[in-house]
Image (spheres, rainbow, N blue to C red):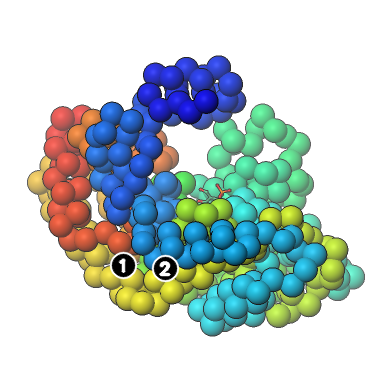
Amino acid sequence: MTTTSSPDVKALESEHVLQNYRRFPVVFERGEGTRLFDTDGRSYLDFLSGIGVACLGYGHPVLTAALSRQAATLLHTSNLYFNPLQGELAARLSQLTGLERAFFCNSGTEAMEGCLKFARKYWHAQGQPRARFVALHHSFHGRSMGALSVTWDEHYRTPFEPLVPGAVFATSDDPEAIDALIDDTTAAVVVEPIRGEGGVRPVPPALASVITAACRRTGALLISDEVQSGTGRTGSFLHSGAVGLTPDLVALAKALGGGVPVGAVLMSKAVAASIAPGDHGTTYGGNLLACRAALTVLDALADGLQESITRMSSYLFDGLAAVARRTGAITEIRGAGLIAGLELASDALPVVNAALDRGLIINRTSANVIRLLPPYIITEREIDEALAILEESLRVAI
Ligand code: PLP
C-alpha cells in the first residue's frame, strides 16, 4: 500500500510509529535544489537541510547519478572484506584534517560512541585505564548510553540513568573551573566547537586555550564533536582549528553523506595504535553506498562549494544583522559559515511556525534560539528570500 495523502500519512504514523517525535503538520514528499514540496504541492525554501544533512540540497544531479551508479554496482558487502572505497575516503579525510585513521559508522551518535570507546581503549592499552570524560554545559552528543552520558541537558539524561559513569560537566564561561576538572584521571575532554543543539554557542577562544593546555599537562585526549559543525559547514572542513582546538579524535556525520547515513571517527595514529581487530565494529559502517555519498560530497566541496560557503556566509550574516536592526527582535546572532543562531528574548517556536506557514523551513533550538542550517548550494537570491520571510515572521510572531 502506498499512502500519499497527508491525513492518511498522519493517521498511519500515529497508529503504528513510536510517538517519540513532535512533528510539524506537514508531509514532504519531494525535493529539488533548496526546496521541499509537500503532499499538497506547496513549496518550501529549506534553511535547515534536514538538520544539517542535505548539504547538496535535494535531487543534486551529481550525487543522484553517483548513488544510482553505485546502487547498480554494489551497495554493501560488510566489513569482513576489503572495500574499494573506504581507503580512498579515509585518505581524503586524512588530507583534509591531518588525522591519519578513520573508522566509519552510520550516525553522529555512533561516531561519538566510537570516540568515547577509542579514548577509553587508548588508556586501557597503556595499562593505566582512565574513565573520566569532561564535557561542556549546553553540549549535545547523541542519545546512546555513552553519548548521552556526555550530553548536558538533564531532561535527556535523567529518565535513562544510571548512564556510563565518569562524565562531569563544566561551564564554558569559567576557564579556571574546567582547568580544575581536567586531571590525570581524565580519559578525554569532549567539545563541540559550536554547540549546535545547545543554542549555536561557539567555544570561546579563552576556553579553547585552557582546554588545550590542560590536555597537554595531563595527557587527556581531546575529542571534537564536529557532527554538526564539520564537513565544511563553517567555512573550513573542520571548525576545531578556527576556535583554537587540535583534537586527537573527531566525530563527523550529518553533511558527510549529503542525506545518506554516514558517520566517521577520525583519529591520530597514536589513538589508532591502541585499537586491535575485534575491539569495535559495525555491519553497515562505511559500506559502498555510504562511501560513494561521502566521496561525492568531498568532491563538491573541493570543486568550489567550500569557497561558496564562505561567500554566502558573509552575505547571510550581513543580512541577519540588518534584520536584527530593523526588527529589534534578535538579541544576539551567533555562528559561522552556514550555521547561524539567532537568540530572541522569547520562545522561538511561534517564529518557526510563522515561517513554515510562509514557506520557509527553519528551526528552534534551546527554547529561544532560531537555528539556520541552509544547504551549501544556497544562493544570494535564496538568502534574500529567506531573510524577507524571516523578518515578516519575526514581526507577526513576537
Ligand atoms: N553530535 C552533535 C554535535 C549533534 O548535533 C548530533 C545531532 O544533532 C549528534 C552528535 C547525534 O547525531 P545523530 O543524530 O546523527 O545520531
Asked whether 171 or 92 is in front, the reply is 92
**Quadrant housing residue 349:** top left
Asked whether 6 or 53 is in front, the reply is 6
Return the residue found at the far front: 72
For the C terminus, give its image quadrant: top left
Tell me the kind of residue under disc 2: Gly
> Residue 232 got which mark?
2
Q: Where is residue 276 in the image (x, y as percent from the top left)?
A: 84, 70
Q: Name the residue under label 1.
A: 309
Q: Is mark 2 on a helix, strand or loop?
A: loop
Residue at screen point 41% across, 54% down: 54
Tell me the kind of residue under disc 1: Ile
> Residue 344 got which mark?
none
Mark 2: give few (<14), some (14-19) or many (20+) Cα within 10 Å. Answer: many
Tell me which numbered mark, 1 or 2, is placed earlier along the sequence. 2
Residue at screen point 50% across, 47% down: 138
Residue behind label 2 places its C-beta within 8 angstroms of ligand 1:
no
Q: Please give left or right for residue 290 compared with residue 388 in the image.
A: right
Is the residue 344 above or below the residue 316 in the image? Answer: above
Is the residue 155 above or below the residue 203 in the image? Answer: above
Q: How many numbered marks appear?
A: 2
Q: Is residue 135 visible?
A: no
Residue at screen point 37% across, 54% down: 59
Q: Position of residue 315 (x, y in %)?
A: 19, 63
Residue at screen point 16% across, 30% down: 396
Asked whether 20 or 395 is in front, the reply is 20
Q: Is residue 18 visible?
A: yes
Q: Please give left or right for residue 394 compared with residue 289 in the image.
A: left
**Quadrant housing residue 360:** top left
Q: Are marks 1 and 2 in contact (CB under 8 Å)?
A: yes
Asked whether 283 or 394 is in front, the reply is 283
